[in-house]
Amino acid sequence: MAKALVAYFSASGVTAALAKRLAESIEADLFEIKPETPYTNADLNWMNKSSRSSVEMADRASRPAIASKVGDMASYDVVFIGFPVWWYREPSIIDTFVESYDFSGKTIVPFATSGARRDVGKFKGTRSRRRGSGRETLLGKRFGQRPGRLGGEVALISGGARCIILRETLSD
């Protein structure tokens, strides 16, 4: 069985809850991507063009510092990366995370939470700067603000190919 990591950034707790459920359902390790300087409510006010999150998202070169690193990234075969959708893409701190590691030979599976965005498949801000040859980034899945029950599995199939299945069922 492939060794998996679920790494996530969450501003409101929605992505954190989903990441924890995913990690538990596929028996993966869990890592929270925390900013070195935590975001305040004022920092997250997307309606204020001067707020920290607005300034970071307006500058494609912005790379907010992360408080800690994954201990042994080399030991993982599959890395799920979760985040809320900000300004129609991943938050800049996800760019920092992705650019901090060599993902050679790993399978990357993005997943996002959003109330509106339907298409999650590629990191828009890091397309040409992702590190690691032989890396495979699979189409991701967007979950709503109140995701239903989550199921998932990571399996190795013939020829060593990796198959990642994320599925959601509505809560009663």
Image: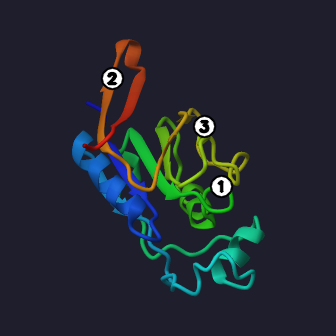
User: Quick one: 68 or 144, which is closer to the camera?
Assistant: 144
Disc nearest the viewer among 1 and 2: 1
> Does residue 56 show up?
yes
> Callout 1, which amino acid?
Arg
Give me the disc on residue 89.
Answer: 1
- Of the numbered discs 1 and 3, the one sitting upstream in the chain is 1
Q: Quadrant of the N terminus?
A: top left
| Residue drawn at 37 percent across, 62 percent down | 16
Say what secondary structure mark 2 lies in.
strand
Disc nearest the viewer among 1 and 3: 1
- Of the numbered discs 2 and 3, the one sitting upstream in the chain is 3
Q: Real-space Cα distance between discs 2 and 3?
A: 20 Å
Q: Real-space Cα distance between discs 1 and 2?
A: 30 Å
Does residue 93 appear left or right of residue 129 in this picture? left
Say what secondary structure mark 3 lies in.
loop
Dot 2: few (<14), some (14–19), or many (≥20) neighbours within 10 Å?
few
Q: Real-space Cα distance between discs 1 and 3?
A: 23 Å
Residue matched to label 3: 133
The image shows residue 17 at horizontal and vertical percentages of 33, 59
| Residue drawn at 37 percent across, 51 percent down | 6
Q: Are marks 1 and 3 in contact (CB under 8 Å)?
A: no
* 69 relative to 44, above or below: above
- Of the numbered discs 1 and 2, the one sitting upstream in the chain is 1
Dot 3: few (<14), some (14–19), or many (≥20) neighbours within 10 Å?
few
Residue matched to label 2: 156
Does residue 75 appear left or right of residue 59 in this picture? left
